[in-house]
């Protein structure tokens, strides 16, 4: 099966290898487009170019945040972010993984795996004891993808409350 997968990757990525690197300000336009693609398939969010660009820029300005992009022949084809959080349960720093997205035409080629492997390596270097992420409930493809990479579902549910900033 591993041989079949390698052939598939080579077929999808002819003559190119994937490079994972830290994002820079020049990447914001493409990263925003990737978030728009992600938020069109997530029922809890909607694409909003201005807000997503502002969010990415703010995240990029945080010294302890990590923004990675996956590039093939200088084209950004995926991204993932990591933010630290102090966990009282763990008694230290854990990481929140967000915004894992690969451009639709490059999916199922191992790029998401490479991004998460890089995030995990960085989290270990930063002394994090746990990573967590949110995935849409009922998305069997995502569940199988994360399961293959040893991510486990928890009994915790996510709730949210939008806060109004109007006076």
Image (cartoon, rainbow, N blue to C red):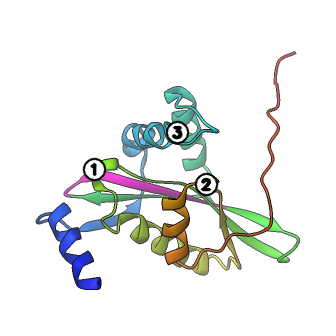
Residue lying farthest to the bottom in this orientation: 2
Q: Quadrant of the N terminus?
A: bottom left
121 relative to 62, above or below:
below
Q: Nearer the viewer, residue 20 or 13?
A: 13
Q: Residue 105: which numbered mark, if any?
A: 1
Q: Which residues are magenta?
A: 73-83
Residue lying farthest to the top in this orientation: 167
**Dividing the picture into quarters, in which one does residue 10 lie?**
bottom left
Give the alpha-carbon distance from disc 2 to disc 1, as whole Å.
Answer: 23 Å
Residue in the picture at 87% in, 74% down: 89
Residue lying farthest to the left in this orientation: 15
Q: Is residue 13 visible?
A: no
Q: Is residue 74 magenta?
A: yes
On the picture, is 159 further left or further right than 113? right
Other-residue count near label 3 (Cα within 10 Å), few / some / many at <14 / 14–19 / ≥20: some
Q: Earlier in the sequence, mark 3 or mark 2?
A: 3
Q: Kindly indicate whether the residue at mark 2 contacts the one at mark 3 (C-beta within 8 angstroms).
A: no
Q: Is residue 12 visible?
A: yes
| Residue under pointer 2 | 138
| Residue under pointer 3 | 39
């Amino acid at each position: 099966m591993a041989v079949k997968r390698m052939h598939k990757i080579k077929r999808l990525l002819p003559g190119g290898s994937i490079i994972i690197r830290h994002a820079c300000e020049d990447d914001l336009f493409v990263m925003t487009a990737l978030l728009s693609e992600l938020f069109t398939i997530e029922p809890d969010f909607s694409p909003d170019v201005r807000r997503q660009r502002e969010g990415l820029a703010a995240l990029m300005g945080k010294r302890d945040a990590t923004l990675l992009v996956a590039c093939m022949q200088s084209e950004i084809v995926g991204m993932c972010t990591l933010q630290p959080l102090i966990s009282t349960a763990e008694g230290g720093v854990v990481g929140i993984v967000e915004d894992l997205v690969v451009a639709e035409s490059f999916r199922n080629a191992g790029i998401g795996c490479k991004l998460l492997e890089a995030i995990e390596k960085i989290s270990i270097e930063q002394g994090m004891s746990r990573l967590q992420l949110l995935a849409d409930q009922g998305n069997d493809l995502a569940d199988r993808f994360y399961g293959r990479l040893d991510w486990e579902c928890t009994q915790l549910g996510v709730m949210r409350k939008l806060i109004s900033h109007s006076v």
